[in-house]
Image (cartoon, helix red, strand yellow):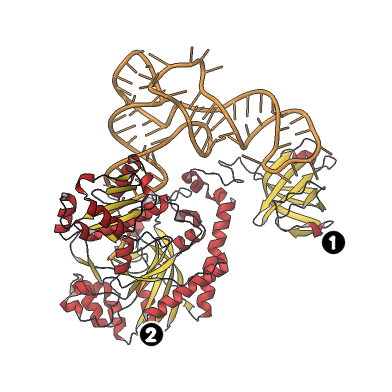
Amino acid sequence: MDKVRTSCGALRAPDEGRRAELCGWINRRRDHGGLIFVDLRDRDGVTQIVFDPQNANFRDAEHLRHEDVLKVRGNVRRRPAGTENVRLATGEVEVAVAELEILNRSAVPPFQVNADDTVDENLRLEYRYLDLRRNRMQENLRVRHRIVKAMRDFFDAREFVEIETPMLIKSTPEGARDYLVPSRVHPGTFYALPQSPQMLKQILMVAGFGRYMQIARCMRDEDQRADRQPEFTQLDVEMSFCTEDDVLETMESCMRYVWKTVLGLELAAFPRLSHEEAIAKYGLDKPDLRFGLELSDAGFIFEDTEFVVFRSALEAGGAVVALRYPGGASLSRRDFDALTEAAREFGAKGMVWLALGSDGVKSSAAKFLSDANVVALRAAAGAETGDAILLFADPRPELAYAVAGKMRNEVGQRCGMRDPSQYAFCWVTGFPYLEVDEATGKPAPAHHPFTAPAHGQWDLIDTDPQKMRAQHYDMVLNGYELGSGSIRNHVAEFQRKVFKRLGLSDEQIEDRFGFFIEALTYGAPPHGGMALGVDRLVMLACGETSIRDVIAFPKNQAFRDVMMDAPSTVPEQSLRDLGLRIVTP
RNA sequence: GGCGCUGUAGCUCAGUUGGUUUAGAGCGCCGCCCUGUCACGGCGGAGGUCGUGGGUUCGAGCCCCAUCAGCGUCGCCA
């Protein structure tokens, strides 16, 4: 057979005798003096190539180094018996190099490309092209591609249309801060980059597309935080004439399809929890259902307690919440101190613990706990001898539950119950419509102001808005909020009322949202949808713990691109063109 | 923005109570040897303002203060 260009992962025993041409990078070289082996790597795998001393190219091969780029031609031959490498797909064969072409040399890399060692992340980001050359990142980005392709295939089969929405839109300063882009053509005015295509996709429903999806890039100028990027990707979906169930069914089926095609896993039906139930059992609106450890209300046990911390919390309308720690009786005081410290970081004022040892009960609040208290607590928490019980009290019940919920995750982690290869999806539904903003004391939408209230509750916006529930739902995976969605307002007048309730003046409503409310007046169909965080989804599917490891070119924690060095200053002339002047703080 | 942790060779890290010579190891890098390795092996070598600035001390990689950077965490994220 003639020479055939092939990948470095393709050759097998039956290819023996073929002439092959390979291109790739030097993954490793093993120089035996009289014989040189090189592992040649490309996107597809690794093939061993051999330089024999009688060959004219042997002298050149002696000077080859890691990451040099080669093109080689030669015969495929079986390796001598006993020297096959079972750990390599191509391990039965090798290529005896007849012709060597060095396509490019590589400088010595700042870290080893051929190993998945730990490397300082900023160094990885500075030399991202070398980092992306490594196995782990190659694999992650290929999984990401397959997930996104599966999403598109799924929605295509259901007759959704992918429609691109603009990146340069109008600033509507509600919620997150906008990234602004100055207009040169209209000095003194600005575009905003989309925080999400929310209003545009709703307008596409008004336009009659009926089923829309987009793999959409979103930008939010928020403060930096560990697992946040200034730009991120969403699977954005919107449908007309649909109910909440329709959206949930669609998105759940999509996840099932993605997991099946990409990971080969069958997902069970997603449990549905009401917001109330999620808080009561798990303390959080994003419960990790890979493990049980449900919380329990212990307030009734301490109604008459002498313990001032509990009593004052309860008298102020607060709560005492109990969390079982399986096997926790064997923890040391030091361990309990560490847990208490963790609870403080989560916003607790403190934590009371009980260790239910076989030799008796120890507790940080022993002198305040009667025997009857302990018996009742064991029953309430479902704890047995050998366990510990952790108690969290706060005058604000939602805070007591939130802390207990975060500690539940902590305990689950310590007990090894958060297996990253397990995928526990669920839905949380029936969120409150409004919540009170702690900073401003004003009502704020629990989701966003385009959400519709629960059936029959439209009038409550005038009479008792705090009682309203929203047709709003979250998809949760392993304790992460993957995304949320809602059935939307499609009635212009109600939409206007919502904005007023949120404290906007008529002028503000007109200026910021006038075009949108007007669109609703022209026969807007009932509609709803959802957006899922693709970065986070891919992260969990890859078993990674940082979204940066599933994004090709992420910013670092300070939101800098350390490879390109962005953001950066611009020439004075560029500023003048835009009518901008920098005011140094 | 608050808090915590980290910063020592190209990379990943060790470095005792503040004092033993020239601050170490593994990998990488350079040179020599090696014909069946695959994390090849053997021998030798280069490589360090201990993040930066100040302070305490007879003496600082180690203690103190400031600062910078990175990571983590909380606030924030309609």
Q: Secondary structure at mark 2?
A: loop
Q: For label 1, count other residues whose C-alpha is less than 10 Å away and answer few (under 14), some (14-19) or many (20+).
A: few
Q: Secondary structure at mark 1?
A: loop
Residue A499 occupies quadrant: bottom left
Q: Residue at x 54, y 74 (%)?
A: A153
Could you tell me residue A23's position as x and y percent?
Answer: 71, 53
Could you tell me residue A555's position as x and y percent?
Answer: 43, 52
Left or right of residue A41: residue A354: left
Question: On what subunit does the disc labeled 2 rest?
Answer: A
Q: Which residue is mark 1?
A: A1
User: Tag 1: residue type?
Assistant: Met
Left or right of residue A100: residue A502: left
Q: Which residue is mark 2?
A: A241
Give whichever of B10, A393 is nearer the camera: A393
Left or right of residue A125: residue A241: left
Q: Is residue A565 visible?
A: yes
